Image (tube, rainbow, N blue to C red):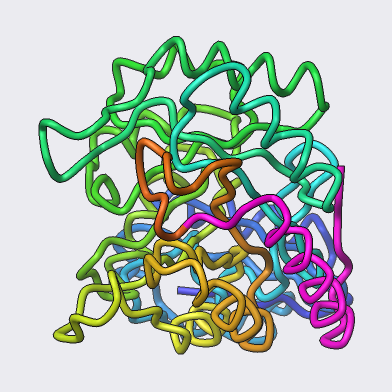
């Protein structure tokens, strides 16, 4: 349920009504916009007498919300949320690019890629230390050593780092990671999501391979319900019957998510298709659809990459793509952030 207050409502009257709601066992989600002040009521609102609330002189309107997600719901928070990560920003017209290799392989590799993507205009360095792989025989990442190498690359370039977490027990290892990624396979790892909700670190949440948008938003709700509202949603392609590419980018998810939620939405065109030459057109489509950022895989030697070389751009290809990204993003009125 949402209670919208009048513009001239006295603060004392607002606080008194909120105290009444809390006395009924409801949680209050307060949202103060430029022109609107509203509170979302979270809990069993069936006992709330709508007519009695409307009779309050401070109240303009009362709305019941049918969606199960509340904190992520745009109805509770009409204005876009902006999530800041270092000098990068996502949401409300702010646009940033994350780039780097699928896996951290060596100090030389990650440092070289970090320097190249920074020069091209990336705002964050992405790199996998812990890698969930379909095959148990595939490269699983350097794990804790990979995090050490990411921190080294950050110290050299100043780029904030984003990397994937797979297990709640690993959270102490991620204490100084700038943006923690939850991968598609862990989108519904609810114990992990609840633990991440206790942190202040921004979370990049990827959509599962076969999950609906409501399920996606409910996973974000798990994190936000724990107290961490710095969540960025990432559309990375879904599994369909089409075998010519790795996944199918659900470009329609971007405007639909922007309508349903106030959270920033970014797109990963590399995982979406799994083919390097498709990254550029999918990236352009994502910007046009309203995305707040992109995550792009870049490797200094894709043919010899230990994971996902087929979808990785070379530094030279990424540099050319960034020129197109800047032009397209500016055309659509976005403010691009770089390191």
Residue found 79% across the figure and 36% down from its top: 86
Q: Is residue 74 left or right of residue 332?
A: left
Residue found 45% across the figure and 89% down from its top: 252
Residue found 73% across the figure and 75% down from its top: 58
Kindly report the secondary structure that dominates the magenta region of the rendered protein.
helix
Q: Residue furthest left?
A: 136
Q: Specify the segment rendered in magenta.
A: 312-339
Tell me the quarter of the image containing the N terminus.
Answer: bottom left
Residue 197: in sight, yes or no? no
Please, is residue 323 above or below residue 120 in the view?
A: below
Q: Was residue 316 drawn as part of the magenta stretch in this picture? A: yes
The front one of 82 and 161 is 161
Q: Is residue 265 left or right of residue 27?
A: right
Q: Position of residue 167 (x, y in %)?
A: 28, 26
Please, is residue 172 above or below residue 45 in the view?
A: above
The front one of 119 and 290 is 119
Residue found 86% across the figure and 55% down from its top: 337
């Amino acid at each position: 349920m949402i209670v919208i207050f009048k513009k001239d409502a006295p603060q004392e009257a607002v606080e008194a009504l909120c105290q009444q709601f809390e006395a009924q066992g409801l949680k209050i989600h307060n949202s103060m916009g430029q022109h609107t002040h509203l509170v979302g009521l979270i809990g069993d609102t069936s006992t709330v007498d709508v007519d009695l609330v409307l009779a309050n002189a401070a109240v303009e309107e009362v709305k019941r919300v049918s969606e199960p997600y509340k904190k992520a719901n745009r109805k509770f928070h009409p204005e876009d949320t902006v999530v800041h990560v270092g000098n990068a920003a996502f949401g409300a017209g702010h646009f940033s690019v994350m780039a780097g290799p699928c896996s951290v392989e060596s100090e030389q590799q990650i440092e070289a890629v970090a320097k190249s993507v920074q020069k091209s205009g990336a705002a964050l360095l992405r790199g996998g230390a812990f890698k969930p792989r379909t095959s148990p025989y595939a490269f699983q990442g350097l794990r804790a050593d990979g995090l050490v190498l990411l921190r080294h690359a950050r110290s050299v370039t100043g780029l904030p780092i984003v990397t994937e977490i797979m297990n709640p027990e690993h959270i102490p290892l991620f204490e100084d990671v700038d943006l923690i990624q939850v991968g598609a396979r862990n989108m519904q790892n609810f114990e992990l999501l609840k633990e991440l909700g206790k942190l202040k670190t921004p979370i990049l949440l990827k959509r599962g391979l076969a999950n609906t948008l409501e399920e996606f938003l409910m996973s974000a709700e798990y994190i936000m319900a724990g107290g961490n509202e710095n969540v960025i949603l990432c559309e990375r392609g879904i599994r369909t019957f089409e075998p010519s590419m790795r996944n199918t980018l659900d470009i329609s998810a971007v405007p639909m998510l922007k309508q349903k939620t106030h959270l920033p939405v970014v797109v990963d065109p590399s995982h979406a298709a799994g083919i390097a030459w498709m990254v550029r057109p999918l990236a352009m489509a994502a910007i046009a659809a309203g995305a707040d950022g992109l995550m792009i895989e870049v490797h200094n030697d894709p043919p010899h990459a230990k994971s996902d070389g087929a979808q990785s751009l070379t530094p030279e290809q990424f540099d050319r793509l960034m020129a197109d990204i800047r032009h397209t993003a500016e055309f659509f009125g976005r403010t691009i952030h770089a390191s």
